[in-house]
Structures are given as structure tokens and as C-alpha cells.
Image: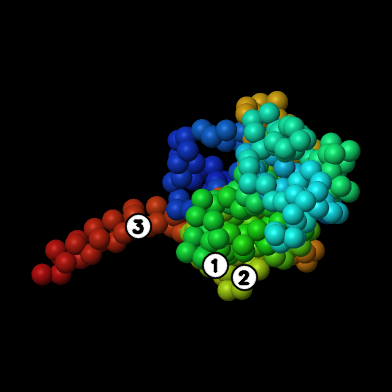
Amino acid sequence: MRVLRAVSLFAVLSGALTCAGCGSYLLPASGPNSIVVRSGDTWNGPPYGLVKLTPQVVKILQEFGPRSLSATFGDHRPPPEITFGIGDVVSVTVFEAAAGGLFIPAEASVRPGNFVTLPNQAVDAKGFISIPYAGLVPAAGKTPAQVEKEIVDRIKNRAIEPQAVVALVTAYSSLITVIGEINSTFTTSPTGRLPANPSGERIVDVLARAGGLRDQMQDMWVVLDRQGRRASVPFGSLIYEPGNNIWAWPGDTIYVYREPQSYLVFGATGGQGQFGFTGGNASSAWRVTLAEGVAAATGLLDFSADPGSVFLYRREPRELAEKLGVDCSKMDGPNVPVVYSVSFVDPAGYFLAQQVQLHDKDIIFAANAQSLEVTKFAAFFAALTSVPQNVVTLGASIETWRILP
């Protein structure tokens, strides 16, 4: 116990000496001492909240994790049946049971079949199509079967057992827009607008029909915009989390873009610098845990790191920070700085670190052990005391050299 108190006393004393002025260190260091981080005090920066990583904290972080497509767009049913819209080009064919009716002349033997195909026409601005003897038939917002029934009802008293077939020729309203990092060389639509498939398609199916990704899935993100709501997810989540591969609906806009995700590592680790999420296998290209982030930096340095003082710096939404117990009264803006503390001295700390997902531009900092601060202070003190001793030694040597001759 006395040894621990002595080490702590030396650490505090060395910390006081290293803080020469405001925001500067007298002794060399790779970052703040763990005591400084845990105090919550800053010299010039914004205030931050310190949160100890516990199972309860991990659970809250998972609840407030990145919004998935399945969570943002809760309707998991297939898309509704495709209906006609303004501008769609449709074809109409009318059949009669016998010649001599409304559309089939009496000399039907001179023409093939007992039907007549009308010229293709577009649904007008008011949502109608024009059918001889039936007038303006409403088509916008209706299915082919509904339009067929409307036509038959209007001419059944004049035609001979009529039947109608209405088909979509060219779609201009039930389209799915796919733009961004798409391989346009193989796309079926140079404009990036694809007609919705009546049988229904999922997001990955639509991307494949649009030509596929221009590059590999690493660092690719997918944004889905639907009816005023928007969500973005890594492309890898569509593959490895099938729940995100939801049904595409007519009118959706899908935007694919490339944005490399990275995090920074400082302190007593084997490697410091910027690390990308892209790893050796595809699954790690879009998701990295805190444990994997420390391991990518070749772990903690055995001779200098304090395994009980590993910190994760991140800005969190105010709502999440308050739920974590952070006092946000002195913090401005929708996002507040939060520092998570995890201890790798506790064996369970590794399990907790495996459950925390890193975000883009996160910062991992591993503090030096307090004993290292004592060692640096002792070396600094020895250097100071050696100066007068060296002067005395030099003076004695000069005097000896002067007397001996």
C-alpha cells in the first residue's frame, strides 16, 4: 500500500511539474496522463463527459447505434402493386365475342382475330386515357385490372361480350432512381432510372440490375430516400445483415457513394496514426470494434502502457450522452464530447471492447502507466542535479591539471 501511495505521489508531482504553463508539458509525453483525463478538466478545449464502459453502457450504445434501413423504414412488406401514373405510356386491346359488334366489323373474316389494338397513349396530366365509345377513362393511381374493368363497364351495353387488356408500355412514374458509384458500363438505363419490377425487388437486386457497384464493397455506403425519410448504411450491412436488404418501392432514390472510414490511435500503443476500417476480410471493411482497433495498432506497449487506462474519444448525440449520465448543461450543440474509459486489466474489459463499434473519426488513446511518469521525472531530476556536479568535477580536473605541471 505504501508503495502504491508513493507511486501515486510521484505521478502527481511529476504531472504538476510537467504542466509548465497552460496547455504545455515540461517532460516529454505522448498525451495526457490518465489522472488528467479522469479529472474531466480541460485547459482550452470544450468540456467533456467521462463514461466508464460497463455492460449497461454497452447496451445503451447498441440501442442508439447507427440507424439501419429496417429500423428507419419499418414496413417490411413487399412493395404495393404498381399503378399507372401521369406520363406512363399504356396500350389497350379490346376483344369481342363475335363480329359485327362495336369494334369488330361484320366482315371479320378478312382480318385476323376478334380484337382491336388501340394506338399507345400516355396518361394525360389529369390522369385519364381516351378510349373510343368509352370516353375519358381514369387511369392514374389504378392498376391494369381496374382500368380494364372500367373500360368493359362503359362499353358492355354496346359491344358483344367485350373484354379489355391494358398493359404498361413505358413507365415514367413507377421508377427507382439509382445514382452514384454504379457501373454504368453494364447498366440497363443510362439515366439511372429503372422501372420498378412488378414482382418486387430488394435493394441489392435493384443495384445489380442498375449495373452493380463500380468498385468492391469496401468503403461503399448506400443511402435510401423514400417519402421524405432517409437512411444510410454501409453496403456490407446489406450483405452480412440481411434484415437491412429491404424491399425497394417505386419512387425510391438509392445513392451509392464511397467514403473511407477511419479512426486515430495515440498513446502507448505499438502503432500510432490513422487506420482505415478496411481489413483483410470483407466483413471488417464496414465494421470495426474497439478491441479490433487496438489490435490493429499492434496492441498496448508492455513496457509503458497502463492497460487500465484506455480511452475512446467521440462526439455523441445529446440525447445519448444524457442517457449515459453525462451532465450536458455546460455543453452546447446537438453533439457533445464523450470519453469512454475501458480497463484491460479486468479480463471482462476485452469482452466489452468487442461489443463497442467504432465510428468514423473516433480517437483511441492509451495512457502511459504512472510508474513511467515517475521514471521520466527521476531521469529529469537526475539531469538537473548532474549539472552542478559536473561543474565541480570539471573545476577539480582543471585545478589538478594546473597544479601537476
Residue displayed at 40% across by 56% down: 383
Mark closest to the chain's N terminus, 1 or 2: 1
State whether residue 149 is above or below residue 371.
above
Judge left or right: residue 244 versus residue 286: right
Mark closest to the chain's N terminus, 3 or 2: 2
Mark 2 element type = helix
Judge left or right: residue 369 versus residue 245: left
State whether residue 318 is above or below residue 66.
above
Judge left or right: residue 24 versus residue 10: left
State the image coordinates of residue 231 (x, y, percent, origin top left): 68, 45
Q: Which residue is mark 1?
A: 216
Front residue of 3 and 242: 242
Residue displayed at 46% across by 45% down: 25
Badge 1, how many Cα within 10 Å: few under 14, some, many 20+? few
Check contact, mark 3 vs mark 2: CB within 8 A: no
Mark 3 element type = helix
State the image coordinates of residue 225 (x, y, percent, origin top left): 66, 43
Mark 1 element type = loop
The three-letter amino acid code for the residue at tag 2 is: Ala
Q: Gap in Å between the C-alphas at discs 1 and 3?
A: 66 Å
Q: Which residue is mark 2?
A: 282
Residue displayed at 76% across by 46% down: 103
Which labelled disc corresponds to residue 389? 3
Q: Gap in Å between the C-alphas at discs 1 and 2?
A: 9 Å
The three-letter amino acid code for the residue at tag 1 is: Gln
